[in-house]
Amino acid sequence: MAVLKKINLAKAFAALDEAWSPRIGGDINDFQLKLVKLDGAFHWHHHEEEDELFLVVRGTLRMKLRDENGGDIVLGPGEYIVVPHGVEHCPVAEPTCEVVLFERNTTLNTGNVENERTIREPGVFERPLMTGDPVETWAAGYRAARQFNASLFDGVRHAANTSSLGS
Ligand code: NI
């Protein structure tokens, strides 16, 4: 039997320390609610198929839009915007903000652009059907993932050092 949990947004955002790194906060059929902290400017992109909803919880978000789409829209807490698929947009936090995204689970954060900010598999903050304390469950998983990534990176660096010594 499913055990339902509530999510506290303030606690959830307090546990997020990395900007531009969306975390999955729940699944609604094939849609997902994601939590993300923004810091400064992102880059222009669009999504071929997916519409994106941005709901500002804290701070100020300027959604830069091309003139043909009406130009920039500035959002404060409690305000949201839906960016339809195909529409170029460039989110800019002024200077930081906390945002809830609602979009299809196939949506790539950088859209049609592939760069160092592209995140193919966002971490899970918490799915409201999981058991355990949401923030702690997510934080523990996140810490473990970071340690694993750090150890991989050390391994790569070690290998690089070793091979350069050999040449
Ligand atoms: Ni987008």
Image (spheres, rainbow, N blue to C red):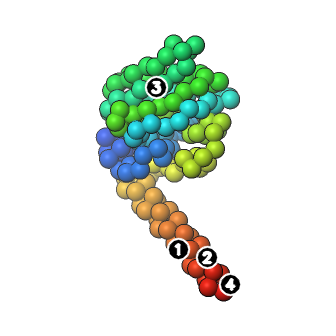
Kindly identify the residue that appears in the image at 43 percent across and 54 percent down: 138
**For the residue labelled by badge 1, is the local secondary structure a helix, a strand or a loop?**
helix
Asked whether 67 or 125 is in front, the reply is 67
49 is higher (above) or lower (below) than 8 = above
Q: Which residue matches tag 3?
A: 63
Q: Which mark is residue 167?
A: 4
Mark in front: 2 vs 1: 2
Mark in front: 3 vs 4: 4
Q: Quadrant of residue 157?
A: bottom right
Kindly identify the residue that appears in the image at 54 percent across and 69 percent down: 153
Query: How far is the residue under mark 2 from the one under mark 1?
Result: 10 Å
Q: Which residue matches tag 1?
A: 154
Q: Which residue matches tag 2?
A: 160
Mark in front: 2 vs 4: 4
Badge 1 or badge 4: first in the primary sequence: 1
Q: Amino acid at mark 2?
A: Ala
Query: How far is the residue under mark 2 from the one under mark 4?
Result: 11 Å
**For the residue labelled by badge 4, is the local secondary structure a helix, a strand or a loop?**
loop
165 is higher (above) or lower (below) than 64 = below
Horizontal and vertical percent position of residue 165:
62, 85
Kindly identify the residue that appears in the image at 37 percent across and 51 percent down: 17
* Mark 2 sits near ligand 1, with its Cβ under 8 Å away: no
Q: Quadrant of residue 69?
A: top right
Say if residue 113 shows up in the picture. Answer: yes
* Mark 1 sits near ligand 1, with its Cβ under 8 Å away: no
Horizontal and vertical percent position of residue 105:
61, 38
Q: Which mark is residue 76?
A: none
Q: Amino acid at mark 3?
A: Met
Badge 3 or badge 2: first in the primary sequence: 3
Badge 1 or badge 3: first in the primary sequence: 3
